[in-house]
Amino acid sequence: MSEQPSNSPGVASTLTTEGPTDDRALRPAPVLSKWLKTRAAWILLLDAALIGLFTAISPDNVFWSAANAQSLLIGMSQGLLLALGLSLLLGAGIFDLSIGANLVLSSVVGAMVAHNFQSIAGDPTSYNNAGLAIAAALLACIVTGALFGLVNGLIVAIFDVNSLIATLATLGIGTGIAYLLTGGSDVAGMPVDLQAKIGLNAIAHIVPLPALAALLILIVLWAVVRYSRYGLRIQSIGSSRPAAERAGLRVRLLLVSLTVLAGALAGLAGFIDLSRFGSSALAGHGNDALAAVTAVVIGGTLLEGGFISIIGTLWGAGLAVILQAGLVISGVSSYWQLIVVGVVLLVAVVLDRVTYKRRSSRH
């Protein structure tokens, strides 16, 4: 009996007969499904749930009032600027404990510069040119913050000092300088227009001007991290600094540029602080670093470096502000507020470790 050739019609028809094709694995996942798998999505949903909870338990539902919403947005704008700077630094694998001290020192310097435009010392109505005084204060805050960041960058990048130790030292130095400059008292007497036209001014009586400025900066930084070579290089350094150096990246220069940028953002937050209260607030920023770390880490940026989540940082900053304001309005002691924020930070660190291990196992 002769064998039928393998290319005969009978065999070919047998081999090529197939059932319906299952292409479910090839279909793109629905947008909502993909979004719900991100850390940022769950933090946003948690923010919404907390707003509902605090509104329900606050007296006369005051948490949902327009005045409180504006106050939350102004406070969030400061925390967001600090958190954005820290997220960039963590993405490159370095830390900054001194951002609160930077904010305080920048606001003090900005206030003192503005005072040079007063015709009567201490009189907020005696400014010959309030607009020029405000512009000078803004510039002084940003420059002071950037110089503070430059010092951090030189210590960390040029002298190879551990960033935690370096910024712990500059935290004390910056705070001490602020107290020396002011004699331990807040600098008041800012131009009336600083609060009226900037700090407490709201677009369409809804969105505070500082919050709008912080949002615009967030959009720019999101685009930088997602689409630019600079953003890619930052995360490359955080993933493996030796590999980044072997690839020819100017790692030290990039790290210094990052600390200067983060410092400038802290300086801008200091100016917003001035515009919000009409004076410096020496004793009001002791927990800024804790709140910023909580916002950044719970938002999805890796502590070990190599990945930055700008959108996650936004919702994380919102979580920190909502928690603090909700506990205050609900009459919870300030001691409990510290405990709650600390617990949230611990949860964020645990999530960070789980995420890091999953990423490591994939590679």
Image: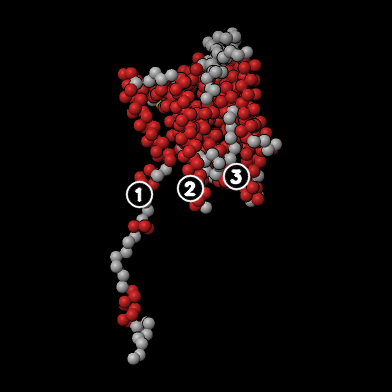
Q: Residue furthest bottom?
A: 1
Percent x, y of residue 65 = 35, 22
Q: Is residue 112 left or right of residue 29?
A: right
The kind of residue on which mark 2 rests is Arg
Q: Quadrant of residue 144?
A: top right
- Residue count near mark 3 (Cα–Cα under 10 Å), binned few <14, some 14–19, many ≥20: many
Q: Amino acid at mark 3?
A: Ile
- Precedes in sequence: disc 3 or disc 2: 3
Whole-number angstrom distance, CA of label 1 to CA of label 2: 23 Å
Q: What label sits on residue 307 in the rendered view?
A: none
Query: Dot 2: within a 10 Å radius of its alpha carbon, few (fewer than 14), some, or many (20 or more) residues?
Result: few
State which tag comes first along the sequence, 1 or 2.
1
Q: Nearer the viewer, residue 209 or 300?
A: 300
In this figure, which residue is indicated by the disc labeled 3?
237
Query: As shown in the figure, which amino acid type bears the numbered disc 1?
Result: Pro
Using the image, tell me which numbered label, if any, was put on residue 358.
2
Q: CA distance from mark 3 to mark 2?
A: 20 Å
> Which residue lies under the disc numbered 1?
30
Q: Nearer the viewer, residue 200 or 20?
A: 20
Dot 3 or dot 1, earlier in sequence: 1
Q: Mark 1 packing: few (<14 Cα in 10 Å), some, or many (20+)?
A: few
Residue drawn where x is 52% and y is 32% of the image:
293
